[in-house]
Amino acid sequence: MFRARVTMPKIALLPRNVADQIAAGEVVERPASVVKELVENALDAGATSITVELEDGGRGLVRVIDDGIGMDRDDALLAVERHATSKIRTAGDLVGVPTYGFRGEALSAIASVSRFELETASSGNAEGTRVAVQGGEVHRPELAARQQGTTITVRQLFYNTPARRKFLRSQRSETRAAVEALTTLALTRLDLHFRLTSDGRVLLDAPPVSSVADRIALLFGTDLVSQLIPVDRNLGDVSVRGFIQRPADARPSGRKAYLFVNGRPFRDPFLIRAAEAGYRATIHPGARPTLFLSLALPGDAVDVNVHPAKLEVRFRERMLVERAVVDAVRGALQPMDASAVVGGSAGRRVGGSWGRDDALYGSPPASIEGSAALGSATRRPADPSSIDSLFEERRSPLSETPWVLPRTVLQVFATYLLFETPEGVAIVDQHSAHERILYERTMAQLSGDGVAAQRLLLPLTLDLTPEELEAVEQHRDLLESAGFEVEPFGGRTVAVHAVPNPHPRFDAKRCFEELAADLARGRFGGWHNRLERFAATYACRAAIKAGQMLNPDEIHDLLARLFACELPPHDVHGRPTIVQLPREEMERRFGRV
């Protein structure tokens, strides 16, 4: 007698609460994720003021209060349902999404892993609505007395998923991450007031401002603002605008890097590397410059729907975007504006001021009538004070004109060249300037047929260390391209039969010895490109030195060749070749302002 074998199904639908918690794991990583999602909803709701309150780093409480359009009772109930959104209606709406939020997952995901409460009121209702959700279970809505806007309170995040909660970091770390999330969004909208408190202490208070420089100064301090130069470059359909740090101010740590596309913040380490590539041969390899860069391109050229938390995007033509970033940074480093400034301060810099026309980013995601709920899709009219106003006048008259040789130049301390500019006084370091000239010329020679060498009647014989001998052998081809003809002479001795002649005061023996020592020590070992590393080392050692007196013809020739370089204001070590003393700074020091 045979018995029928009963088998259990292998595939089953997940319970809703489990599915919601899985979704929450994709959208909500920590309290900062809650802050980001809720503030984005407030922005889409047309808020003009947004307040974030934290307790215990957000682990105990995250509350976001806005004065946006608010919701009625029906929309408030729909808002906490999964995939409920006021932002899209069809799949076609996902192309070039004009809002910060659009996936319809945030409120449902947050509510599934917290004790959640939504309180809201719209302009057409005399009373508001309160909706409570605990662990994904929606309670009966109640009436609430409040003015137009929305308040969302999230208590005990991950209380029902203890495995997730134990991975939260310290109160200080979680607070810092939440502040960073709000800081990023505050950079996208100049016309709004952002405020964050932690356990009753105000950590961020950014009222509306008229320029990006003012907002950066509020968030990071005026010292940083004085170190920034404007970026503005178009390549095809890609526009890159923003601010970057002067090479001389870049440091190995403490940098800030913010990227935006069509007004939306995102992360992309490859674009950060592209921006750093634009700094090539202007900063030390270990330096990390601060960047505030915004990209604008057609909506169908970028896909913003590739990450649950909307932190990443995908570009249709990534190579074009990366090249645009490199070119934009490179172009910003060329004019006089990019040189170091004595006594520089926000809004008062040689080479132009930052005013309302200096908006940093392209059009921000549009506001939608409804706070993260299913509501009217009518867009609010653009606010003229918002960040969607673009650059109109970004470069000073000085940077728009070619570099012009001064009529009168004064050499002081046998090291610095001083001359008047339309905006003040320029000071040139003769060694750094010549280093820039030789670097660019050497790079061209190493990439071409090399430089004509000057043969010596009697060869130089030099004793090297084993490490130096190995370095010279390893770089023999580059040494020959630079003009040094070298061959072994027995033991640790080499014979130099020909040398370059970069200037009349050139000391070939000293230059070769220092060059060999630098190469052996790997002094520029952080340079990825071997040609650049060698050219930088050679330029440093072959350039005229501080303390050498120059005659008028030599000064004129040096400045003429410097101004003909691709990047005149910077040497290859991250130091300035030119420092500007603005007229306003001089007048301030003498009490004339």
Image (cartoon, rainbow, N blue to C red):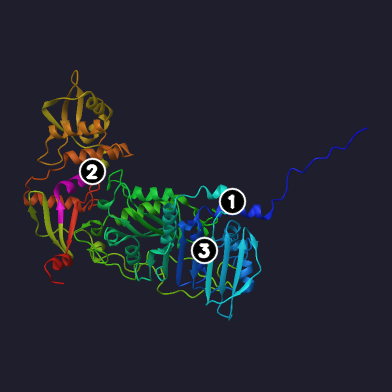
Q: In 3D space, how far apart are the residues under numbered discs 3 and 2 (Cα atoms)?
A: 51 Å
In this view of the protein, which residue sits in the foreground, 509 or 415?
415
Q: Identity of the amino acid at label 3?
A: Leu
Which residue is disc 1 drawn over? 161
Above/below status of 69 relative to 435: below
In this view of the protein, which residue sits in the foreground, 351 or 158?
158
Report crowding for label 1: few under 14, some 14 to 19, many 20 or more residues within 10 A (C-alpha).
some
Going by the image, does 518 lie left or right of 202? left
In this view of the protein, which residue sits in the foreground, 382 or 398?
382
Q: Position of residue 422 (x, y in %)?
A: 17, 65
Which residue is disc 3 drawn over? 38
Which residue is disc 2 drawn over? 439
Q: Which of the 4 quarters of the picture holds residue 420?
A: bottom left
Q: Position of residue 330 (x, y in %)?
A: 32, 53
Q: Which of the 4 quarters of the picture holds residue 4?
A: top right
Proximity of marks 3 and 1: CB atoms separated by less than 8 Å: no
Start-end of magenta stretch: 427-440
Proximity of marks 3 and 2: CB atoms separated by less than 8 Å: no
Q: Which mark sits nearer the N-terminus, 3 or 1?
A: 3
